[in-house]
Amino acid sequence: MGAIGTILATSDGGAHWSAQRSGTSADLRSVSFVDASYGWAVGTTLDADYQVTGNVILATSNGGADWHPQYSGSAAGFNAVDFVDAAHGWVVGEGGTILATTDGGATGSVQDSGTTRPGAVAFLDPSHGWVGGGQGILATTTGGWPPAASAMPRNPRGCFGSQAQVTDVPDSPKRLEDPQPCALATTTSV
């Protein structure tokens, strides 16, 4: 994935790479494959001043030999995509955009993230997933937002879910202990 619609593919574990025709000049930012055939790529179109002017969703059912655009109904730039099977997928992007589909991208629904710029999305199955961005991490057990969304705040160093531990000590200020950046976040009181 890359600038000017770049898609590279390998069939030998990365020893050799070949370009695939994406049919777009968008800045492609993320790709998700559920098997050797079915995949999706998303990105952002930019003007000469690098301002977001739109987006692109591309889908393939033949391992990337052919990529076809899918309509998003959104003007937001897209940052990440994740599919768990050939039907269930999510796209996140600028302005807090979350798009969800249950039919491989033929149709979709807009979901409210309550954030401004989600940059990552990961699902384990059609129900359990996370969206991360500059304002925290959202988690769902129902396949989307709303309902049942929860937010985990970002730690003061800006890394999501760091093993930051805020400890309350009587008659002293709170202190931040961060022994292992980017592990599970916990908050405790003493």
Image (cartoon, helix red, strand yellow):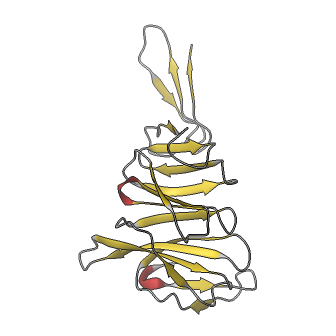
Q: Is residue 56 left or right of residue 36?
A: left
Front residue of 178/46: it is 46
For residue 60, which quarter of the picture?
A: bottom right
Picture quarter with the C terminus:
top right
Name the spot of residue 122 as percent of width and height, x first.
61, 55
Among all residues in the image, which is located at the extreme top?
Answer: 171
Q: Which of the 4 image quadrants contains residue 61?
A: bottom right
In percent of the image, x 50 and y 84: which residue is there? 6
- Left or right: 184 as drawn, with respect to 43: right
Relative vertical location of residue 147 with respect to residue 31 in this rendering, above or below: above
Q: Is residue 113 left or right of residue 30?
A: left
Pick whichever, 2 or 87, lies toward us.
87
Residue 167 screen position, x and y as percent: 52, 21
Q: Residue at x 60, y 41 (%)?
A: 180
The residue lying toward the viewer, choosing from 106 and 86, is 106
Instruction: Between residue 184 and residue 131, name the one nearer to us.
Output: 131
Q: Residue at x 41, y 44 (%)?
A: 135
Q: Position of residue 132 (x, y in %)?
A: 50, 50
30 in relation to 133, above or below = below
**Residue 139: where, in percent of width, then height?**
57, 43
Residue lying at the far left of the rendered structure: 49
Query: Left or right: where does residue 84 sit relative to residue 5?
Result: right
Give the number of marks: 0
53 w.r.t. 157: above or below: below
Instruction: Please give the name of the residue rendered at 49% of the width and 72% of the height, measured from the top-left corner.
Output: 42
